[in-house]
C-alpha cells in the first residue's frame, strides 16, 4: 500500500519551480499524444506555441485574449488567499457582460464621455451581484461556496441565453441570438492603432497593481491573508470574518464582471451567447499556476492565452479538435496539483504482509472496555 507521508519542511524553491515542472510535463505529454494521433510532434508544438505569436498581429491578439483571463485571475487570487473557493468567475463574467450590455443598449442613442464609465460600472455591479449571492449564502447559511458558485455559472449562462433570445435580441438582426451593436460611446477605445488591443488591457494591469497594493500594503489585505491561514486566529484578533468574506467575494466578482463587460464593449461590440469560451474556469488554473502572486499571474495568463490561440491554430492547420485547449488546461492543472502534493508529501510503500515489521501495518485489535466505577 502506498501512503503519503508529510515532509518535514516544504521547499520554497520547489514551490516556485513546481509550475515550471508542470508546464514541461504538460508539453512532454502533449508530444506523446501527438505521436499517437499520427501528427508530427515538433510540428504540432511549433504550431501551438510559436505560430500564434510569430508576428506583431499575433502578439496583439495574445494581449486581447489575455485581458479577461487576467482580470478574473487577479480577482480569484484574493478569495483564494482567504481560503474562499470561488469557482464562479465564469458566471460572474457572464453577468457582467449581461448587465453592461443592458446599460449600453439603454444608452444606445446617447453620446458623451460618461456613457462608457456607466456601462463598465454596470458590468462590475453585475459581477458583484452574482458573487454577492454566494457570499450571502455562505455567511448566513454556511453553504459550501464551491457548490453554490459552480451551480450559479450554469444559471448565469441560461439567463444570458434567455436575454439574447428574448428582451435584448436585435429586432433587425435576422433572428440571430445577439443584441444590436453598441454605439461608439459604449465601446472601449483602441490603445494601439491597427490592432484590437483596447483600453481593457490598461484596466486589467491597473487591477493587478491595485490588488498587489491591497494584499501587500493594506491592512485589509493583511486581514484576508490571516483569515486564510487561520480563521480561528483571525476571529480571536477581532477581525470580522463575515465582512472579509463579503469583501473578498465582491471584489472578485467585480473584476470578473469587468472582464465580461470588457469583452462585449471591446473586441465583440455586442452581446452574443459565446462571450466567453471558458475564461472564468481558465482563470482558476492561472491563479494557482501563478502562485496567487500578481507577477506570476501575469505570466501564467500569457501562457493560458497562448494555449487558447494555439488550440485554434492547431484546429486550422493540423485538423486537430478545438477541445485540444481544454485537454492541455486539464493536464496543466493535474500536473500542477501532482507536483504540489509531492512537494509537501513523500510516497512511502507500506507492506501488508503479516509478520513484517518496521513499515508494516499491524492488524487492528479489538478495543476492550474497562469500567472503573464502583458497583
Image (tube, rainbow, N blue to C red):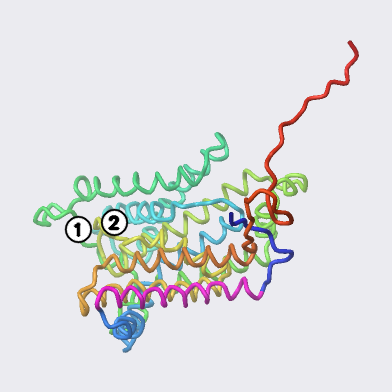
Callout in the foreground (2, 1): 1
Give coordinates of residue 207: x percent, y percent: 51, 67
Q: Residue furthest left?
A: 174
Q: Residues within 10 Å of mark 2 (few under 14, many from 20)?
A: some
What is the tally of numbered marks visible in this picture?
2
Q: Tell me which label, 2 or 1, sits earlier in the chain.
A: 2
In what quadrant of the picture does the C terminus appear?
top right
Q: Is 275 placed above or below 158 here?
A: below
Q: In what element is the residue under mark 2?
A: loop
Q: Using residue 26 as the reference point, say whether residue 174 is left or right of it.
A: left
Give coordinates of residue 32: x percent, y percent: 36, 76
Q: Residue under circle 2?
A: 107
Q: Nearer the viewer, residue 328 or 177?
A: 328
Which residues are drawn in magenta? 13-38
Q: In what element is the residue under mark 1?
A: loop
Residue at 38 percent across and 77 percent down: it is 63
Quarter-wise, where is residue 236 in the image? top right
- Looking at the rendered structure, which numbered label has been put on residue 267? none
Q: Residue under circle 1?
A: 180
Q: Using residue 204 as the reference point, say whether residue 273 is left or right of it.
A: left
Q: Residues within 10 Å of mark 1 (few under 14, many from 20)?
A: many
- The reply to whether the magenta stretch includes residue 36 is yes
Separation (CA) of disc 2 from disc 1 = 12 Å
- The reply to whether the magenta stretch includes residue 83 is no
Q: Residue furthest top?
A: 375
Q: Main secondary structure of the magenta part?
A: helix
Give coordinates of residue 43: x percent, y percent: 29, 85
Q: Nearer the viewer, residue 370 or 80?
A: 370
Residue at 52 percent across and 75 percent down: it is 21
Q: Nearer the viewer, residue 75 or 33?
A: 33
Amino acid at each position: 500500500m502506498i501512503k503519503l507521508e508529510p515532509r518535514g519542511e516544504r521547499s520554497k524553491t520547489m514551490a516556485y519551480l513546481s509550475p515550471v515542472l508542470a508546464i514541461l510535463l504538460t508539453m512532454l505529454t502533449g508530444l506523446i499524444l501527438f505521436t499517437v494521433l499520427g501528427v508530427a510532434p515538433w510540428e504540432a508544438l511549433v504550431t501551438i506555441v510559436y505560430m500564434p505569436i510569430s508576428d506583431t498581429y499575433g502578439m496583439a491578439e495574445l494581449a486581447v485574449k489575455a485581458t479577461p483571463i487576467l482580470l478574473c485571475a487577479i480577482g480569484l487570487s484574493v478569495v483564494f488567499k482567504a481560503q474562499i473557493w470561488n469557482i464562479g468567475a465564469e458566471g460572474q463574467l457572464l453577468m457582467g457582460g449581461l448587465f453592461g450590455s443592458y446599460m449600453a443598449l439603454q444608452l444606445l442613442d446617447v453620446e458623451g464621455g460618461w456613457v462608457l464609465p456607466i456601462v463598465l460600472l454596470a458590468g462590475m455591479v453585475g459581477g458583484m451581484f452574482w458573487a454577492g449571492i454566494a457570499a450571502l449564502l455562505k455567511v448566513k447559511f454556511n453553504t459550501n461556496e464551491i457548490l453554490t458558485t459552480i451551480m450559479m455559472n450554469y444559471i448565469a449562462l441560461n439567463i444570458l441565453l434567455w436575454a439574447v433570445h428574448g428582451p435584448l435580441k436585435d429586432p433587425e438582426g435576422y433572428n440571430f441570438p445577439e443584441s444590436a451593436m453598441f454605439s461608439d460611446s459604449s465601446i472601449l477605445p483602441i490603445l494601439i492603432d491597427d490592432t484590437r488591443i483596447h483600453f481593457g488591457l490598461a484596466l486589467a494591469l491597473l487591477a493587478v497593481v491595485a490588488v498587489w497594493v491591497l494584499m501587500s500594503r493594506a491592512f485589509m489585505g493583511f486581514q484576508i491573508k490571516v483569515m486564510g491561514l487561520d480563521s480561528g486566529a483571525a476571529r480571536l484578533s477581532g477581525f470580522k470574518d463575515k465582512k472579509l468574506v463579503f469583501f473578498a467575494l465582491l471584489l472578485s466578482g467585480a473584476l470578473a464582471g469587468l472582464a465580461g463587460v470588457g469583452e462585449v464593449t471591446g473586441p465583440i461590440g455586442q452581446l452574443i451567447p459565446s462571450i466567453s469560451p471558458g475564461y472564468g474556469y481558465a482563470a482558476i488554473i492561472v491563479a494557482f499556476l501563478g502562485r496567487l502572486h500578481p507577477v506570476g499571474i501575469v505570466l501564467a495568463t500569457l501562457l493560458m492565452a497562448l494555449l487558447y490561440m494555439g488550440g485554434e491554430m492547431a484546429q486550422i492547420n493540423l485538423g486537430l479538435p478545438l477541445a485540444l485547449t481544454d485537454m492541455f488546461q486539464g493536464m496543466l492543472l493535474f500536473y500542477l496539483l501532482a507536483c504540489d502534493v509531492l512537494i509537501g508529501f513523500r510516497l512511502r510503500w507500506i507492506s501488508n504482509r503479516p509478520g513484517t515489521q518496521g513499515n508494516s501495518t499491524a492488524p487492528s485489535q479489538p478495543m476492550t472496555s474497562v469500567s472503573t466505577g464502583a458497583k
